[in-house]
Structures are given as C-alpha cells and as structure tokens.
Amino acid sequence: MRVFVTGATGALGRYLVPGLVAAGHEVTATTRTPGKVAQLRQAGAEPVVVDGLDREGVIAAVKSAAPEVIVHEMTALAGLRSLRNPDKTFAATNELRTRGTDNLLAAAGQAGTRRVIAQGYAGAGPDRRSGPLKTEEDPPDWRPIRSAVQGPAAIAYVEKTVPAEAPEGLVLRYGGFYGPGASDFLLEMLRKRQVPVIGGGTGVWSFIEITDAAAATIAAVEHGAPGLYNVVDDDPAPVAEWLPYLAKVAGAKPPLRVPAWLGRLLAGEFVVSQMTTSRGFSNEKARKELSWEPRYASWREGFRAWVSG
Ligand SMILES: NC(=O)c1ccc[n+]([C@@H]2O[C@H](COP(=O)([O-])OP(=O)(O)OC[C@H]3O[C@@H](n4cnc5c(N)ncnc54)[C@H](OP(=O)(O)O)[C@@H]3O)[C@@H](O)[C@H]2O)c1
C-alpha cells in the first residue's frame, strides 16, 4: 500500500518507516527539516519537506503522494523536562493534535485516502482515582487541573474526530514509550536521582517498548476495524514498583521517596497525580483485533534490554 507517514523522524517514526518498507509498503515520509531528507531516503521512504500546520502544504503533499493510508505521529516533545505547567509544555503538541489532525483529515478527503491512523495516549494521566484498567470504552476522563486543560482536550479531540471523519479512522493510544531513542531523558534523570517516588507511588502506568509500538502501528496500517486501540504491554504497574526497578537496572541509586505535599512543591500537581492516581490500560482489544502482540510483554524484560542496549 501507499502509506504517508508524518512525524517520520521521531522516536516512533524511526522504526515505523523501515518497518513499513520491509513489509512491502511504499512510504512517503515527512519532515520539516531539509537536513533530515537523506535519513528518510536511507530508510527507504520518499521524503517530503512540509510543516504539519501548513494546511495547503499538507494537502498538496498528500494529494501528490495519493496514499491509501496516512499515519499521524507528529508531536513536539523532544527536550521535554518539566511538567509543572503542562499546557505550556505541550502547547505545540496540542496544536499538532488539533490543527495538525484537521489538516491531515482534509488532505485525506481530497486525496481519497481510506485509512487515517493517529497517535493517542495511554500513558500516565491525572486520573480521578486509581482503579480498574481502562479499556477503549473508557474515555481519558482526567481530573481537571488548572495547568493541564488543553492536553486532555487535544487528546479527546483526536479520539473523537479521527474515527468520525476518516472513512477508516483509528487512534492508537500508546503507553509510555521506552527503548532505544525513546525517553532517554528518564534514564538520565534517574541516574541523577531527580525522579522521586511521590506519595507512595500508587499511580499505575502502562508502557510500550518503542519497536513494539511501531509493530502495532504497522499492524493497524494493514488491518483492524476503525476505532480506538490501547497499545500497551501486558503489565501495568504502580510507580512504586517500576521506578525503583528501572533505577536498579540502570545502575542508579534507589529513587528518593517524598510525600505528596513536597511533590506538589517540587514537580506540580500534574506529576503528583501521575504518580498517585493514574490508571493503567488493557491491551486485550489490540492483541485480538490487530493480531499484534508485544515482543516485550512486560517492562521488566523491556527495561533490561533498553538499558543494556
Ligand atoms: N506515549 C508516549 O510516551 C510518547 C509519545 C510521543 C513521544 N514520546 C517521547 O517524547 C520524546 C520526544 O519524541 P520524538 O523523539 O518523537 O520527538 P518530537 O519532537 O516529539 O517529534 C516527533 C516528530 O514530529 C515531527 N514534528 C514536530 N513538529 C512538527 C510540525 N510542526 N510539522 C510536522 N512534523 C512535526 C518531527 O519531525 P521533524 O522534526 O523532522 O520535522 C518528528 O518526526 C521521546 O523520548 C519519546 O519517547 C512519548
């Protein structure tokens, strides 16, 4: 199939593009940076330089490639450090999730593209309280936090708009990425003991190794009914379990433990919620309907491979 990949140079795109090419697809891949064209060509794609927020540019690029499938992996998360003010930190990503999505859907309409796959989110959020795993029937439903209003709205926008407006719209809610080239900042911060377990670490996180996320995306290019899919591993776990484990395999000292009030002062309300009330996600639907299974069923073996790789 002809597949148009945006965000092709990102943490996920770097594995997705060669994976699609190896599976026999004809890939057009975007970047905003002419200097990255060679790397896309080397991965086997036809490169296009375009900004996802340039509506006319996006429409022209998609019409020229005439893809059967569009994959939206545009985010602006590189260099992310503080989550004290999420709406500020994620402003550009939120724009890509709203206006960037609209541009791709308009382009799909004009080019006659059948399937549009967009990046959703099954990572840690400020859930109202810990509880059972979320299925695709469960909306993100985060607790409103004054500094984090636009992010949840942008994610909800993708979940609503893509399945409603594309002939076949799929949203892949990825768990927290880790693996080669993904979330390396977390390892750095852990080694500096800058990531404490806050308030008992009862928040449950779902992870997905980055090449497993790419494999699920390739599966979604090829089959699966329209709708939402949780792309996470089999082992959602509380912060109090996975964080000390990652520190250990990374050769760092055990993370510090701080009470919630101090966590609020140090990192802000959003992070405290992620660490105390976040809920995990079930991957039952993705396993069944995408005929996909994660190579790393648990972050336990995945983290070890990441750190030793
Ligand atoms: N669920 C999760 O946990 C999750 C999800 C996403 C990312 N992350 C993490 O966030 C970190 C950074 O992610 P990343 O390396 O993928 O970098 P990133 O800066 O988020 O960029 C991702 C992709 O989006 C493209 N992009 C950004 N702005 C664009 C725009 N205006 N128009 C078109 N394309 C645009 C970039 O392309 P060009 O720069 O080539 O134009 C790049 O290919 C990683 O550690 C990753 O693991 C986590």
Image (cartoon, rainbow, N blue to C red):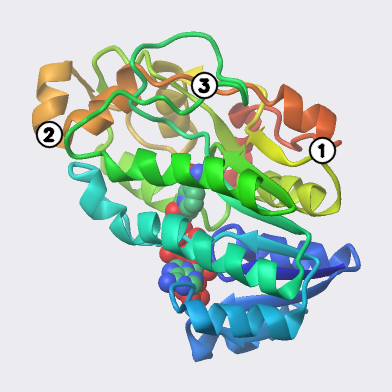
Residue 16 percent coordinates (x, y): 70, 61
Q: Residue at x 41, y 27 (%)?
A: 243
Is 210 in front, or is 250?
Answer: 210
Residue 122 left/right relative to 47: left
Of labels 2 and 3, the one closer to you: 3
Residue carrying label 3: 280
Tell me, for residue 290, which label it has, or none. 1
Residue under the point 48% across and 85% down: 33
Compared to residue 98, the image places residue 154 above or below, namely above
Q: Earlier in the sequence, mark 3 or mark 1?
A: 3
* Secondary structure found at label 2: helix
Residues at marks 1 and 2, CA–CA distance in whole angstroms: 41 Å
Tell how many labels: 3
Left or right of 122, for residue 38: right
Q: Residue shown at 53%/28% (left/top)?
A: 206
Closer to the chain start, of discs 2 and 3, is 2
Q: In the rendered image, which residue does mark 2 sit on?
A: 266
Instruction: Name which residue type carries label 3.
Output: Gly
Sequence-earlier tag: 1 or 2: 2
Which amino acid type is marked by label 2? Leu
Task: Tell me which corner region of the image, top left, top right, bottom left or bottom right, holds residue 171.
Answer: top right
Mark 1 lies on a secondary structure that is: loop
- The residue furthest top is 131
Under circle 3, the secondary element is: loop
The CB of the residue at mark 1 lies under 8 Å from ligand 1: no
Left or right of 211, for residue 143? left
Is residue 299 visible in the rendered image? The answer is: yes
Which residue is nearer to you in this view: 74 or 18? 74
Question: Disc 1 residue type?
Answer: Leu
Q: Between marks 3 and 1, how big is the CA–CA gap? A: 20 Å
